[in-house]
Each structure stands twice: as C-alpha cells, then as structure tokens.
Image (cartoon, rainbow, N blue to C red):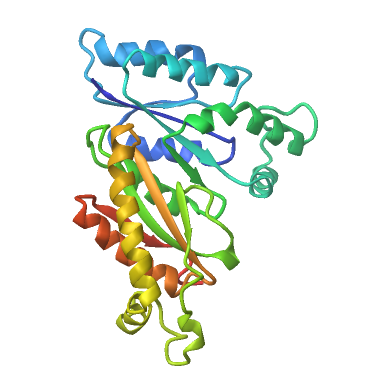
Amino acid sequence: MPELVVVTGMSGAGRSTAADVFEDLGWFVVDNLPAALIPKIAELAAGAPGSHFDRVALVVGASPELPEVAPALAALRHDGTAVRILFLEASDEVLLRRYRESRRRHPFSEGSLSQAIATEREALQSVKGDADLVVDTSSLNVHQLKARVQEAFATSEAIQRMRTSVVSFGYKWGLPTDVDLVIDCRFLPNPYWVPELRPLRGTDATVRDHVLGHPDTTAFLERLGALLELLVPAYVREGKAYLTIAFGCTGGHHRSVAVAEAVGRMLGTFGVQAQVGHRDIDR
C-alpha cells in the first residue's frame, strides 16, 4: 500500500512550493488534480498492474469542484486507504499582499479579491477540519516552508506513527494557529524581572534552572506528564498522524522555552521522539 498525501489549502499559501519539496524527496507528484480524479489516481497507485509508486502526493488546487474534495477523501478513508491531508493556510492580509505582488488572478475571482479569498476559505472549511497537518505560512518564507514540509514528510515511516512537535512562542507576537494544544506558562515566575537573566534565553542553564526549579513548575510538569501519558497513546490509537503542543509566555524567550525543552525530554521517556522548536526566541 503506497503512502498517499493530499496537499491542499488556500490559493497563495504555498501549494506549489510544497509540491516541489515532495518531488525533491522522491515522491510521485500529481499537481492541480481535479477532485473527481482523486479516487482513480489512488486506485491506480495502490493496485494497478506494474505500478511502482510507493509514495504519491496529490496537489489539489482551487476550483469550482472544491466542495467535492472532502467527500472524495472521506470515501478513500472509508475504503481503507491510508491518506494524510496537508492543508496550507495563511491570513487574509498575507494572501491579499501575495496576490497583489504577483498580479495573478485568484481562481475564485468574481468580485473583489477579498471576496474571492473569503469564498475559497468557506469552501475549504470541511477539508481543513479533516486535515492531519495544518501549516500556517503567514510568517514563513519559502525556505522555512520547505523545511517544515521536509521535517514532516522526509522519512518513509508508517502512516500510524505519530510525529510530535513541541514549540514555544510569545503571546505578544500572537497565538500560533497550526497547533493542537496550547498551554499558557505565564503563571510561572518571569526571569525577565531578574536583571542577570533578562538577556539570556530558556536554553541557557541558568534560566532553565531558575524556571524548572520553582515549586510551581515542578507541580505543573508532574500533572502535565500524567496528562500527556494519557493523551499521546490515545491520539496514536485514533490514527492521528501529527501532534503539535505549544507553550506560551509573554515574549517567548524564557519560561515557554525552558518548559518546551523539558516537555520534549519528558516525551522521550514515553517513547515519543519529539521535535522541539522555539518560534520567537530570536525576536
């Protein structure tokens, strides 16, 4: 049974870039695929005589057929086909800027560009709700998007193995939109108010020890560990392909960073190899 990934999402959010990454990784890529052909391509990849495609990426773009995408993917899953959905998202403001810079015509253009984006977003709601991985490209450049896709799909692991990421962020820079669990660390004592710790980061030993050594942090991590020990295996049993846990503090420099690193290590004790990243540590 081949690995099957459907790449979809908002026009201007980076589908073409993602398609290039899959091609570079050795996947067989079918770009701009009509929704009606999704089941046929999946059938050919899975059982056609002489078929040798073990990893297939179907890039589904915007068209009047968008409402047919969700039922087509649901039918594949109902028939037992292992399929993952990568949904690329971006804010309205970013999509407007990208279209104005490129001077391309939006596929849903009938009125204003803003109306076209709103219409497409509404049409894609059901597909986004079924997505295994949602990547918001609003603040990503081309190289960062490529790295994100490579991180998620570079290896040919079994579909059932959940890929787990832990990220830190700062609330002052906005909530991350492409995560599953968000946990607020602002109840912990803030190293920012300790003059010698302010210029450092949560990856520094002195900040780490300051944050993790506090009794509130110890109690918090004990209870969080019990929760994750329950949740992670349950997500795996339900077939979730990706799990992203985000920890936030005010600036994303100290508390959330130290806690994210600690949780990454904690997940390792559960047999889960988590990728740890810090969105705002250099801001």
Q: Residue at x 47, y 50 (%)?
A: 142
Q: Quadrant of the N terminus?
A: top left
- Where is residue 260 drawn, in percent x and y? 37, 64
- Where is residue 84 drawn, in percent x and y? 37, 30
Q: Is residue 57 left or right of residue 141?
A: left
Figure label count: 0
Q: Is residue 210 left or right of residue 61?
A: left
Occupied quadrant, residue 67: top right
Q: Is residue 158 left or right of residue 57?
A: left
Work out whether residue 140 or residue 80 is closer to the camera in this orientation and state it.
Answer: 80
Work out whether residue 120 or residue 270 is closer to the camera in this orientation and state it.
Answer: 270
Q: Is residue 279 visible?
A: no
Q: Residue at x 28, y 53 (%)?
A: 274
Q: Is residue 24 left or right of residue 14?
A: left
- Where is residue 9 drawn, in percent x and y? 54, 34
257, above or below 86, in the image: below
Q: Residue at x 24, y 24 (%)?
A: 54
Q: Residue at x 30, y 54 (%)?
A: 226
Work out whether residue 9 or residue 278 is closer to the camera in this orientation and state it.
Answer: 278
Occupied quadrant, residue 89: top right
- Where is residue 72 drawn, in percent x and y? 47, 15
Occupied quadrant, residue 215: bottom left
Outermost residue to the bottom: 196
86, above or below 264, in the image: above
Outermost residue to the right: 111
224, above or below 281, in the image: above
Q: Is residue 181 visible?
A: yes
